[in-house]
Amino acid sequence: MSVTIIDGDRPMSVASATAEGNNLWLSLDDLCATTGWELTPQGVCLGEVCVPIPAGREADFVRADGTQFNLAALARQLNQPAVHDDAYAVWFFGEAVNARDNAWQSLQAPEFTLPDLDGQWQSLSEYRGQKILLVSWASW
Amino acid sequence: MWQGLYEELKDKNFLIISVAFDTGGVAAVKDWIRPAMPAQLPKELLDIMGWEETLSSKAAMPTYPCLIDERHIVAERYNMVNVPTAVWINEAGRIVRPAESAGATDGFRTLDRATFQMPVEVAVAGKQARKRYIDAIRDWVDKGDASVYALSPDEVRRRVHGRTEHEALAAANFRLGQYLYQQGHRQAAQRYFAEATRLHPESWSFKRQSWELEELGKATGPEFWAAVDALGEKPYYPPVNL
């Protein structure tokens, strides 16, 4: 049975993934295809960023035969919130707790892309150069 | 109701973007994105909203972007815990006022819950607060960053609190609930909405959205009023510090 992984915005169905309690194992290929992270001799890397696997805890991250990686262990290491529903086999990974704070230091308005009533997707950045009043409301 | 203000200021390089925090999507919001027609609204409702007549009386469909945020991602990214909440963004894409109540006040708490009547002095005070906020927007649109209402970067940072682990986990629970809801697993979704509300009790958006998805009308029903009463001295809409 596959697992649906939502890492960021897009839900992806991952055939190789297996949930074991609070751990989520997937093949190295699926790890890269789903999240962009790659296992390298320096640790697990996404672009320029490499996270070393903590010494003595290799077994938490990589299966003994080297074929599978534990995405949930990486999320814990990065302080990313992770929530899963086992009945429907869905895992959601949020942004690292302090990522938003770091972004706030620059005070640049966070980007978002959302649909309007007609299903046209629009991004905040399309309107750069104007003063913008961003206002929330709800039907409830 | 923002269309009147938009009409007034749109030729001054000013845009409104409205975002609906609505997991129910288009079906939930479509009947609400419509011309403001004050003539058809009861006086009680106009008192609660507190808009100047000159701004609310123009019946026109919104011509600014009205976006739908089923996942409440704008709430998460901009630290918004209620509606209506607004953020001011300058021409360079920098935040000059972080999330705050967009001119709404706690006056609604004095409503007679049977007749929806509000004491006259409360209605007047609500209108004044709304006008002060709208006038601040006008000043900013005229003067830009030189407006006293466009806050300095240090002041904006001072007003934004860092995200706690509980808040981050609450948002993750909400997102999982939203995904399950969208997939049609409504019962399962409620568990995660409830957990989001428990972890981040200050978020009225999580609370009222999950009530509404559980049962239409619950977000404005007895549970809502009980939760408002439980605030005691604490504000529902913290007063805007202009």
Image: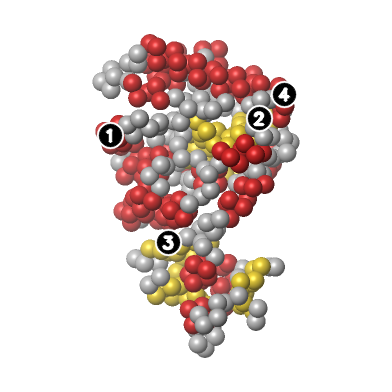
The Cα–Cα distance between marks 4 and 3, rounded to whole angstroms, is 46 Å
Marks 4 & 3 on one chain: no
Pointer 1 or 4: first along the chain: 4
For label 3, the crowd category at 10 Å Cα-Cα, with few meaning under 14, some 14 to 19 and many 20 or more, is many
For label 4, the crowd category at 10 Å Cα-Cα, with few meaning under 14, some 14 to 19 and many 20 or more, is few
Which quadrant holds the C terminus of chain B? top right
Q: Chain for mark 1?
A: B
Q: Which residue is mark 4?
A: B143
Point out residue B130 in the picture as x, y percentages from the top left corner: 51, 20
Answer whether labels 3 and 1 touch (C-beta < 8 Å).
no
Per the image, label 1 sits on a secondary structure element best described as helix
**Which kind of residue does numbered mark 1 sit on?**
Ala
Instruction: For marks 4 and 3, give the one nearer the viewer.
Output: 4
Q: Which residue is mark 3?
A: A83
The Cα–Cα distance between marks 1 and 4, rounded to whole angstroms, is 43 Å
Q: Which residue is mark 1?
A: B226
The answer to whether residue B137 shows anywhere in this view is yes
The Cα–Cα distance between marks 3 and 2, rounded to whole angstroms, is 38 Å
Q: Which residue is mark 2?
A: B150
**Which kind of residue does numbered mark 2 sit on?**
Ala
Point out residue B85 in the picture as x, y percentages from the top left corner: 51, 33
**Which kind of residue does numbered mark 3 sit on?**
Val
Q: Chain for mark 3?
A: A
Answer whether labels 4 and 2 touch (C-beta < 8 Å).
yes
- Is B152 above or below relative to A90? above
Question: Seen in the image, is B35 located left or right of residue B142?
Answer: left
Per the image, label 4 sits on a secondary structure element best described as helix
User: Which residue does the image show at 35% across and 16% down from the upper left?
Assistant: B118
Question: Seen in the image, is B26 located left or right of residue B228?
Answer: right
Question: Seen in the image, is A44 located left or right of residue B21?
Answer: right
Q: Chain for mark 2?
A: B
Pointer 4 or 2: first along the chain: 4
